[in-house]
Image (cartoon, helix red, strand yellow):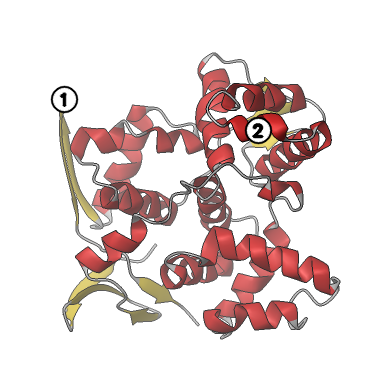
């Protein structure tokens, strides 16, 4: 990761890296207002019954964006078979709807071009996998609650195996908060369970086939910064950021969150100091669009 130099351009704070180009996207109030809209607060959904992680498909799309495809033309490119050429029209439309919801519905420039930049390191790189996983999870309430709830609890207890029955039990518990789940057909519930576990395996959080094992994903600093920016936009400060349940997506303890934030401080992206219960955390870098060609 290259060192960052900071410049003020027309009221926007942008980061100018040694290579690549910069589009100053946000000033602090505009950017933080948009970031507050990222988290999925809609009603629970079965959207993941039709498609899973879509890693290869999303990587193809964002690789094309890195090669010059404007994000505004991604839908046209997918629907017309300019990317994902081998799939049927209905399948391409389903893929587009899923990718749009995860990555391009809110803050499309920042999220989309950050993903485009990360494709340089390859499909299986922590740079791409961890960032794609973050938005896959935070843009779907059931995924987020499953990972930060039952998956995290099992990890804490060092009981690291999980299967479809565990997810179905989770849905039963969620039905107490969201009664609409009680109306879902059993076939829908089982398909959602299978696709959820397969997706988490593709992103690296699980391994195995039938009875899966929980494991940590490797998280890139850029992914840490994205989550920090979202939490800051939502009004969290200091210790509340360290204690946010969102870090459970990476199976991180508070000490591990502190280490990751310390790495961002060394990169001069944030100011971070911790002494006892006192935590000082300030943003230096602001959300921006950076990309390399």
User: Relative to 29, is 134 on the left or the right?
Assistant: right
Query: Residue at 74% of width from left, 41% of height from top?
Result: 198
Could you say which disc has been placed on residue 277 in the image?
Answer: 1
Query: Residue at 67% of width from left, 68% of height from top?
Result: 96
Tell me residue 33's x, y (percent): 28, 61
Tell me residue 109's x, y (percent): 44, 73
Query: Residue at 76% of width from left, 70% of height from top?
Result: 92
Quadrant of image for the N terminus? bottom left
Is residue 27 something that shows in the picture?
A: yes
Compared with 203, 89 (above or below) is below
Q: Nearer the viewer, residue 159 or 196?
A: 196
Q: Nearer the viewer, residue 219 or 65?
A: 65
The nearer-to-camera label among 1 and 2 is 2
User: Relative to 58, is 35 on the left or the right?
Assistant: left
Could you say which disc has been placed on residue 16 in the image?
Answer: none
Q: Nearer the viewer, residue 189 or 226?
A: 189
Task: For the residues labelled 1 and 2, say whether their Cβ atoms are less than 8 Å apart.
Answer: no
Compared with 79, 110 (above or below) is above
Compared with 54, 290 (above or below) is below
Residue at mark 2: 181
Q: Nearer the viewer, residue 184 or 15?
A: 184
Tell me residue 134's x, y (percent): 51, 49
Tell me residue 6's x, y (percent): 20, 72
Neighbour tally class for label 1: few under 14, some 14-19, many 20 plus, Cα within 10 Å: few
Is residue 122 something that shows in the picture?
A: no
Neighbour tally class for label 2: few under 14, some 14-19, many 20 plus, Cα within 10 Å: some
User: Relative to 8, is 194 on the left or the right?
Assistant: right
Q: CA distance from mark 1 to mark 2?
A: 40 Å
Secondary structure beneath disc 1? loop
| Label whose residue precedes the other's in the sequence (1 or 2) | 2
Secondary structure beneath disc 2? helix
Compared with 226, 292 (above or below) is below
């Amino acid at each position: 990761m290259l060192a960052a130099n900071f410049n003020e351009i027309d009221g926007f704070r942008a980061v100018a890296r040694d290579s690549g180009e910069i589009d100053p996207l946000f000033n602090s109030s505009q950017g933080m207002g948009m970031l507050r809209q990222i988290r999925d607060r809609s009603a629970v959904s079965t959207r993941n019954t039709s498609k899973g992680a879509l890693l290869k498909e999303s990587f193809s799309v964002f690789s094309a964006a890195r090669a010059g495809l404007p994000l505004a033309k991604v839908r046209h490119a997918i629907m017309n078979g300019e990317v994902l050429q081998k799939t049927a029209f209905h399948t391409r439309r389903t893929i587009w709807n899923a990718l749009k919801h995860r990555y391009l519905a809110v803050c499309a420039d920042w999220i989309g071009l950050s993903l485009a930049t990360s494709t340089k390191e390859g499909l299986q790189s922590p740079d791409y996998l961890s960032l794609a996983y973050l938005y896959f999870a935070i843009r779907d309430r059931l995924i987020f609650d499953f990972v930060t709830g039952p998956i995290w609890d099992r990890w804490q207890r060092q009981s690291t195996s999980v299967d479809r029955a565990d997810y179905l039990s989770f849905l039963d518990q969620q039905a107490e908060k969201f009664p609409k789940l009680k109306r879902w057909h059993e076939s829908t519930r089982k398909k959602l369970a299978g696709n959820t576990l397969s997706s988490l395996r593709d992103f690296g959080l699980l391994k195995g086939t039938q009875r899966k094992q929980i494991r940590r994903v490797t998280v890139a600093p850029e992914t840490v910064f994205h989550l920090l920016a979202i939490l800051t936009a939502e009004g969290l400060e200091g210790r509340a950021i360290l204690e946010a349940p969102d870090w459970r997506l990476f199976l991180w303890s508070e000490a591990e969150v502190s280490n990751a934030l310390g790495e961002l401080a060394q990169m001069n992206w944030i100011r971070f100091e911790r002494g006892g219960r006192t935590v000082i955390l300030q943003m230096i870098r602001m959300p921006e669009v950076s990309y390399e060609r």
